[in-house]
Image (cartoon, coloured by chain):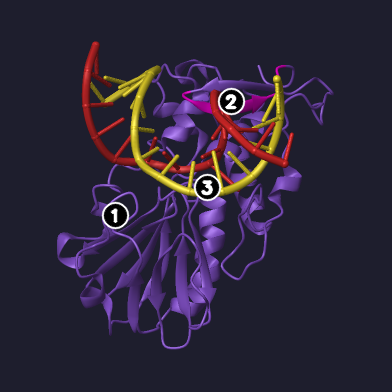
Chain colours: A purple, B yellow, C red
Amino acid sequence: MPELPEVEVTRRGVAPYLDGKVVVGVALRAEGLRWPFPADLAGKITGRTIRAVKRRGKYLLLEFDHGTLIVHLGMSGHLQILPLSAPVKKHDHFDLVLEDKLMRLNDPRRFGAVLWHERGKGAAESHVLLSSLGVEPLGTEFSGKLLYRNTRNRKSAIKQVLLSGRIVVGVGNIYASESLFQAGINPETPANRIGLARYERLAQAIRSILTTAIEQGGSTLRDFSDPDGRPGYFQNSRFVYDRAGQPCLICGNTISQIRQGQRSTFFCANCQK
DNA sequence: CACGACTCCTGCTGGC
DNA sequence: TGCCAGCAGGAGTCGT
């Protein structure tokens, strides 16, 4: 479900309820998700204060003085802020209980994760899952030049390279297709055959699309909503994703759907060369 | 290292 | 209407 915009919308939604608040307890209703829940999570964070809620790629980082709770929503994870009395529903696997509210993680497919990183092992960014991530697409380091420089030895299709997260993070299946459409680049083009000028266009497209998606509250294609239950509206701004067989909104050509690395890609063969 | 296939899991949809 | 194959917004792991 969530790509960078949805995770950022989630972060902004939960942060006001978590910042500076004390954890009263946790509820765990499964062994774990993709990986087991941290050993003695309650003992680790009960009575501790959440100092900040940050994001790195699609990972949410709940920072404490003595470590960081790392939360990933996987494909189907969803966080909500609820009253303490909220009834438990199917797939409600984890609650972070505060004094007057709780943050609940619901994740039907259980591809998500809740992990703990001790402060003593360095910043959360040094965690094994975070240490080799690419740059933030909305940060100052990201640019067309960076994309160009880091793709000289990448023969894979540009769509796959974007999805890999090793050069730039947070660009998932929807926004990869949308960004390549806006930049006029065919998703099957080998990354090392794209020049600097086109990468400048792509970087600009990625920034612009992610920024717009965040402002619109993300994409609600099936079930996404922010932690207060509000849906996103970016799906109304899609040019190609999930529009196979429909006319291109720019040229009228029929939108194509192909498979790349077991994932669907959508594009306009006329607008994207 | 780069690359591609496979894998985890539940739920929904589309074709019969 | 029921059944079931196939696909869904992610990404770690393994073999080459």
Residue ID at (49%, 61%): A90
Label 1 vs label 2: CA separation?
A: 31 Å
Quadrant of the snapshot with the C terminus of chain A = top right
Residue at 26% of width from left, 55% of height from top? A36
For disc 1, the marked residue is A125
- Pinpoint residue A212: horizontal percent, then vertical percent: 67, 51
Residue at which label 2 appears = A198
Residues at discs 1 and 3 both on one chain: yes
Residue placed most toward the observer, A169 or A145: A169
Residue A163: x and y in percent read 47, 34
Determine crowd level at label 1: few under 14, some 14-19, many 20+ residues with C-alpha closer than 10 A: some
Query: Looking at the image, which residue sits at the far bottom?
Result: A99
Tell me if residue A88 comes above or below residue A56 in the rendering: below
Same chain for mark 1 and mark 2? The answer is yes
Q: Position of residue A268 (x, y in %)?
A: 71, 22
Q: Amino acid at mark 3?
A: Glu
Q: Earlier in the sequence, mark 3 or mark 2?
A: 3
- Compare residues A81 and A141 and report the one nearer the observer: A81
Q: Are marks 3 and 2 in contact (CB under 8 Å)?
A: no
- Type of amino acid at the residue the image marks with label 2: Arg
- For label 3, the crowd category at 10 Å Cα-Cα, with few meaning under 14, some 14 to 19 and many 20 or more, is many
User: Which disc number belongs to residue A3?
Assistant: 3
Magenta residues? A261-269
